[in-house]
């Protein structure tokens, strides 16, 4: 996969305030999201020490015995531990597969709106493991930075469409989001992968933008494009990986493609490889009406959807029952 299809976007010129620099950055983003739905983003200002500390704390939790983790077990969309076999992301594409080879610690938006029905479904309290008390404060700090960065990215995306800066952020006054710390252990934990089994099966994300802090690995992220098929995702140690999800693709009338991706199983040449990814899924205010932008920006007119009816159906689809 070439750097042209998944470019490195430095946010420095965007943040400079210079109109020409901002326009050049926005044009590169537009091209990349049409081709692959993915970007590598540098100049984001996230201290690399913070995700490193989160990984250290998360590994301490994931390496606990299963019986210690079990009281925190939840299903997809819950707040707590998603254990082995809980999720199969390829189900979202209607593709049967064995469950994904991962565990996750999952949290989500938890500041109530004051609307009981909405809060009961989308803004429940988060749970934190008593055995690893450092995780709570570290993740809370990271989430604040991810929220601010995601809104900035939405403003950049609006500029890339030649639209008003608040085209998307007018719908993020009280948004939902999800956050997974994904643990991909080696085969000594998972056993050898079954035919068609991945650490995460092929899928597109469901929301607006996803911000991923990942470790490089042989059993790592792959991206699918029409031009190249499946290819290893480009790597830059200073970059965050950003992709758009299904809601954003619908919103742009399929001008931009939701980034299709998967995570390879533990490789035969390195069966003990262990990776931890931090995945922030950004969405929008509950029950936003998402309508396709008209031509010439949009290319397909989708039926309008209620954002959170749409998201709930997607989350239910990948749950292993």
Image (cartoon, grey):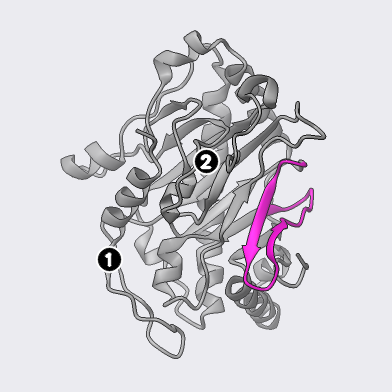
Looking at the picture, how far across and down is residue 219, in whole percent? Answer: 72, 41
Q: Is residue 194 above or below residue 234?
A: above
Which stretch is magenta?
Answer: 218-240
Is residue 228 located in the magenta-colored stretch of the structure? Answer: yes
**1 or 2: tag closer to the N-terminus:** 2
Closest to the observer: 86 or 121?
A: 86
Q: Nearer the viewer, mark 1 or mark 2?
A: 1
Residue 167 seen anywhere in this rendered image of the structure: no
Identify the residue under disc 2: 143
Closest to the observer: 216 or 135?
A: 216
Mark linked to residue 305: 1
Looking at the picture, how far across and down is residue 25, in whole percent? Answer: 67, 75
Residue 40 seen anywhere in this rendered image of the structure: yes
Mark linked to residue 76: none
Residue density around tag 2, few if under 14, some if 14–19, many if 20 or more, within 10 Å: some
Residue positioned 69% across, 59% down in the render: 41
Q: Is residue 87 above or below residue 11?
A: above
Relative to 121, 138 lies left or right: right
Distance between the Cα atoms at labels 1 and 2? 27 Å
Residue positioned 26% across, 57% down in the render: 287
């Amino acid at each position: 996969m070439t750097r042209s299809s998944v470019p490195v976007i430095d946010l420095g010129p965007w943040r400079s305030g210079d109109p020409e620099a901002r326009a050049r950055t926005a044009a590169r983003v537009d091209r990349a999201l049409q081709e692959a739905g993915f970007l590598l983003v540098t100049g984001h200002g996230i201290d690399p020490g913070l995700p490193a500390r989160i990984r250290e704390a998360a590994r301490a939790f994931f390496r606990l015995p299963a019986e210690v983790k079990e009281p925190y077990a939840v299903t997809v969309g819950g707040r707590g531990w998603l254990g082995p076999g809980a999720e199969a992301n390829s189900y979202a594409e209607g593709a049967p597969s064995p469950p994904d080879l991962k565990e996750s610690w999952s949290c989500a938006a938890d500041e109530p709106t004051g609307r009981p029905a909405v809060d009961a479904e989308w803004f429940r309290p988060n749970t934190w493991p008593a055995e690893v008390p450092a995780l709570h404060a570290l993740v809370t700090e990271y989430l604040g930075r991810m929220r601010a960065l995601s809104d900035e990215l939405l403003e950049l995306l609006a500029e890339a469409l030649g639209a008003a800066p608040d085209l998307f952020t007018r719908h993020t006054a009280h948004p939902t989001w999800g956050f997974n710390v994904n643990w991909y252990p080696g085969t000594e934990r998972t056993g050898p992968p079954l035919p068609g089994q991945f650490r995460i099966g092929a899928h597109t994300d469901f929301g607006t933008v996803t911000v991923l802090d990942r470790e490089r690995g042989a059993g790592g992220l792959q991206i699918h494009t029409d031009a190249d098929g499946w290819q290893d995702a480009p790597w830059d140690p200073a970059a965050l990986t950003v992709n758009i999800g299904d809601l954003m693709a619908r919103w742009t009338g399929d001008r931009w493609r939701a980034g299709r991706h998967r995570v390879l199983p533990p490789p035969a040449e390195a069966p003990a490889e262990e990776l931890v990814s931090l995945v922030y899924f950004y969405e929008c205010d509950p029950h936003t009406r998402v309508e396709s932008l008209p031509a010439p920006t949009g290319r397909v007119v989708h039926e309008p959807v209620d954002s959170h009816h749409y998201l709930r159906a997607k989350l239910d689809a990948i749950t292993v029952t």
